[in-house]
Image (cartoon, rainbow, N blue to C red):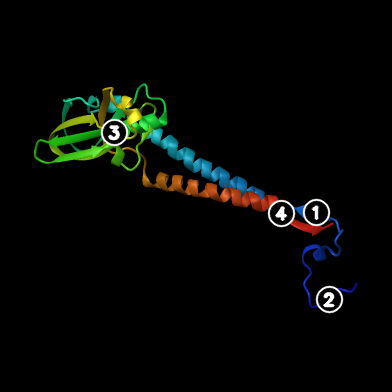
Amino acid sequence: MTPNPDFTPVGFAATDAPDAIVRRRRNPVWLALALLLAGAALAGIVLFVAAQVENAPGRGEAVADGRVAALGSTDAPVTRFNGSGDYTVWLETDGVSRSNSRDTVVAATNCDAAFENGGSAHFRGARQGASVTVEDRSTVGTFDAPDGAVALSCRLLPFGRYGNRHLLSTERSFFVTEGRPGVGAPLWVGMFAGAFTLFLVPLAWRRYRAGTLRPR
């Protein structure tokens, strides 16, 4: 049968006959691109996590420490120190291994800072955007203190499901460090770029797997 020049062959017609033998050919460029994207994404995320751990201060760098009053306690111990600038409160979550339980304890922690020269600051773990967690310590929040004495008190208030209230019945330790937690803006950009790049990996991989069908 003579092909009609007015029609473009598609499907089986493109292979000259219904029983024609075809071969799937895959472009290695798509495979290389998928591997490159996966490596870049993982590198950005791992670098961000490693920098968080490396830059996170420990108790040895604390300017003050204290106790978080348990849920239902009538008195919250007051921690006093002198200084000025940004400070971060770190909660110690010893004995809380599950991440959901730890998040509940952090979110339930409420702190008040009163300043010698007037003014105050209130912050809580549930309103800090994203808590930085390193080993068994997590941030509750940050505050900016004017020059002078600071009186800081923290307590656990109801948060989350009623069945988890037992997590809030234990008094916990906290410590205060200078500055704000986390890493610089370039590493944040790298982390978000890495997370976005991960979404592109399956696209490149599927394009490689699909290949193109060509007659043998």
Residue that label 4 marks: 211
Between 79 and 33, which is closer to the camera in this rendering?
Answer: 79
For the residue labelled by badge 1, is the local secondary structure a helix, a strand or a loop? Answer: strand
Mark 4 vs mark 2: give the one in front: 2
Residue that label 2 marks: 4
Mark 3 vs mark 4: give the one in front: 3
Residue that label 1 marks: 23
Kindly report the distance in space between the C-alpha atoms of the residues bearing marks 1 and 4: 10 Å
For the residue labelled by badge 4, is the local secondary structure a helix, a strand or a loop? Answer: loop
Q: Earlier in the sequence, mark 4 or mark 2?
A: 2
Neighbour tally class for label 4: few under 14, some 14-19, many 20 plus, Cα within 10 Å: some
User: Which circle marks residue 108 in the picture?
Assistant: 3
Mark 2 vs mark 1: give the one in front: 2
Whole-percent x and y of residue 96?
37, 24
Determine whether 28 is above or below 86 in the image.
below
145 horizontally vs 2: left or right: left
**Amino acid at the residue labelled 1:** Arg
Kindly report the distance in space between the C-alpha atoms of the residues bearing marks 2 and 3: 76 Å
Q: Earlier in the sequence, mark 2 or mark 3?
A: 2
